[in-house]
Image (cartoon, grey):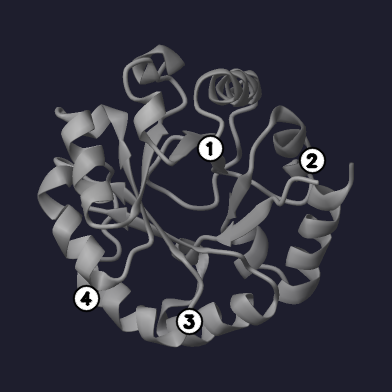
Amino acid sequence: MKLRKIAPSILSADFSILGDEIKKVEEAGADLIHVDVMDGHYVPNLTFGPPVIASIRKVTELPFDVHLMIENPERSIQDYADAGSDFITVHVEAETHLHRAIESIKEKGLKAGVSLNPATPLCLLDDIIEDIDLLMIMSVNPGFGGQQCIKNTLPKIKKARNLIDERSPHVLLEVDGGVKLGNIRSFKDAGADIFVAGSAIFTSDNYEITIGEMKKILNEE
């Protein structure tokens, strides 16, 4: 049975007790911690930088899935690697020299990912799919937490699953945006491996119950 993973997005956590929030989702069964980095340019909001990531790195041993929603991400890869990232994902739309950015991440011993916005076609991956470790399909437009997923991204996830299976089976397929209990089964059926969930977890009354119910759905065959 395929091991599917839950990655709580700390963008939806209570920033005033961020370390405690991370510990709570770890104890509740999270598999990774998803860190949304925004620069106020590529996307409107401004969030975490390397100092914050280095600080929260001390409170958990879970892998950090760092999603760079920033302009020219290649310039910052070293900083985010030094801060304690395990995965670094860059946007196809934000990186002029994508292959060089991927190689830079991998040279630092990290897993390299690429992300596609909802309107970005999969064909842009034709020359990079064998070189990456993770493909993130955005099911919302990046920049804000708590959005509703765009339903027509499901066929895109299915196509991404087929592309991975045909050309690069080691690649993990991640979905980010609007994932919740009511739709996580659809994303699973479309072929995703990693499920980023922010507000669905951090606004729930009980993280352990919410993550447990999500994993129950993901583990059903």
Mark 3 surroundings: few (<14), some (14-19) or many (≥20) residues within 10 A:
some
Front label number (3 vs 4):
3
Q: CA distance from mark 2 to mark 4?
A: 36 Å
Left or right of residue 133: residue 29: right
Q: Can residue 200 be seen in the rendering of this structure?
A: yes
Residues at badges 2 and 1 in contact (C-beta under 8 Å)? no
Reading the image, the residue beneath label 1 is: 170
Left or right of residue 79: residue 58: right
Front label number (2 vs 1):
1
Residue under the image location 42 percent in, 77 percent down:
15
**For marks 1 and 3 on the same chain, the one whose residue lies earlier in the sequence:** 3
Looking at the rendered structure, the kind of residue marked 4 is Pro
Foreground: 105 or 15?
105
Looking at the rendered structure, the kind of residue marked 2 is Arg
The quadrant where residue 35 appears: bottom left
Reading the image, the residue beneath label 2 is: 185
Looking at the rendered structure, the kind of residue marked 1 is His
Reading the image, the residue beneath label 4 is: 51
**For marks 4 and 1 on the same chain, the one whose residue lies earlier in the sequence:** 4
The quadrant where residue 189 appears: top right
Establish if 158 lies above or below 16: above
Identify the disc placed on residue 60.
3
Q: Can residue 40 be seen in the rendering of this structure?
A: no
**For marks 3 and 4 on the same chain, the one whose residue lies earlier in the sequence:** 4
**For marks 2 and 4 on the same chain, the one whose residue lies earlier in the sequence:** 4
Q: Secondary structure at mark 2?
A: helix
Left or right of residue 42: residue 213: right
Image x and y of residue 183, in percent? 75, 41
Q: CA distance from mark 2 to mark 3?
A: 28 Å
**For marks 2 and 3 on the same chain, the one whose residue lies earlier in the sequence:** 3
Residue under the image location 83 percent in, 61 percent down:
213
Residues at badges 2 and 4 in contact (C-beta under 8 Å)? no
